[in-house]
Amino acid sequence: MPIPSPIAWNSDHTIRILDQTLLPGAETYRDLDTVEAVAEAIRTLRVRGAPLIGIAAAMGVVVGAGKRGSGEAGKTPLEEIARACELLGATRPTAVNLHWALNRMRRRAERACAEGEALREALISEATAIWDEDRAMCDRIGELGASLIPEGSTVCTVCNAGVLATGGIGTALAPIYTSHRAGAKPHVVVPETRPLLQGSRLTAWELTQAGVPCTLIGDGMIASRLRLGDVACVIVGADRIAANGDVANKIGTYGLALAAKAHGIPFYVAAPTSTLDLATPDGAAIPIEQREASELASWQGTRTAPAGVRVWNPAFDVTPAELISGIITDKGIFRPDEICRSERPGIDRPVVN
Ligand code: MRU
């Protein structure tokens, strides 16, 4: 069964998204026709995953620029685009792809205005290019990463870094889909990924749709599962990779990396080059999103913790470079300490903010 695309253009270049907060119970699509609606969808994780929020934000700039690319009364088109970028850029702080995509849209708008091009067409084509490039990067990550998965082996991941998180076949899940298509019969261990359950709700769902065998485990079961000795490697996604190779990803990734190290299991990060942030020196400088207490203290409106309990709910953690065996990008597989070398062929210095 094909996995539905998490995002699409409507014919008038408003946006249709698959509401991921309702999966796996319901496959519900929402049309977003204002920049505020796009920002709300990103903030509430209706669309989520670092590459996909970059794509959604780029498409949101088109929506925010207005039907004729002329903006609201009283504002110049560039002022209106700057307002849209500000609103969208404030939704989630950790995934650098969001800012990377918004910077591209802002620069394209400035060039279109300076050169007298049709602004709306220029913005549509830039947002579409960001999406197309992400799809191609996912394919390349899949081809390169598949070489790390022995035939018939078990791979552990975390959160969701698949079709639902990108413009293509995913990052961490791309090597798994590629080896599945090649008949190598991978099996995936999927931690549930509390508190929002991207592992059980989304990864287990999309792998099942694609016919890839998987086993769901609780987050607290990770170390025991790795101790069994049948997991060949761990592959996770990333929200931001700092210049020293430290990686921010979904909360729980750091613990998974420690458990992998303790059991001698290779730990790989898969990410497109749009997730590299060479302007951030190390993991300590990555802004970590703190989310509402209610996400941890209740589930679907029912309280699961006493009223008033103090809650710590970071959405992401940082895995230090020394725990990472390799970073699978669309430009090659690198050791974390190689990632920031500007002389490295093919890796462009991303422009952040
Ligand atoms: O809070 P989320 O669901 O947006 O977190 C997503 C992750 O942490 C993913 O692993 C990461 O964005 C990479 S997605 C290809």
Image (cartoon, helix red, strand yellow):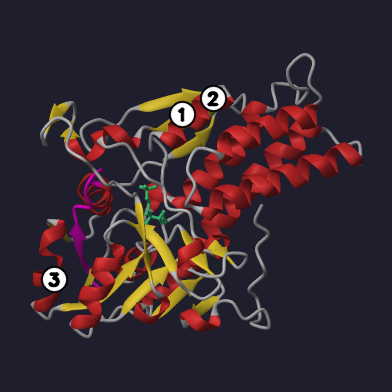
Is residue 186 located in the magenta-colored stretch of the structure?
Answer: yes
Q: Are marks 2 and 1 in contact (CB under 8 Å)?
A: yes
Q: Residues within 10 Å of mark 2 (few under 14, many from 20)?
A: some
Q: Amino acid at mark 2?
A: Glu
Is 13 one of the magenta-colored residues? no
Q: For residue 40, which numbered disc appears in the image?
A: 1
In the displayed structure image, the side of residue 137 where residue 48 appears, left or right? left
**In the rendered image, the vertical position of residue 263 relative to residue 241, given as above or below:** below
Q: Please name the residue shown 75% across and 26% down the image.
A: 69
Secondary structure state at the residue bearing disc 2: helix
Q: Residue at x 78, y 39 (%)?
A: 109
Q: Tell me whether the residue at label 3 lies in contact with that at label 1, contact meaning CB atoms closer than 8 angstroms.
A: no
Residue ID for mark 3: 223
Residue 85, numbered circle: none
Residue plotted at (24% across, 67% down): 255
Give the residue pinned by disc 2.
36
Q: Position of residue 258 (x, y in %)?
A: 25, 74
Circle 3: is it few (<14), some (14-19), or many (20+) Cα within 10 Å?
Answer: some
- Residues in magenta? 184-197
Q: Nearer the viewer, residue 225 or 31?
A: 225
The secondary structure type at the circle numbered 3 is helix
Count of numbered tags: 3
For residue 5, what is the image quadrant? top left
Residue 334: tell me if it is visible: no
- Whole-angstrom CA distance, mark 3 to mark 1, is 36 Å
Q: Callout 3, which amino acid? A: Ala
Q: Earlier in the sequence, mark 3 or mark 2?
A: 2
Q: Which quarter of the figure has residue 59?
A: top right
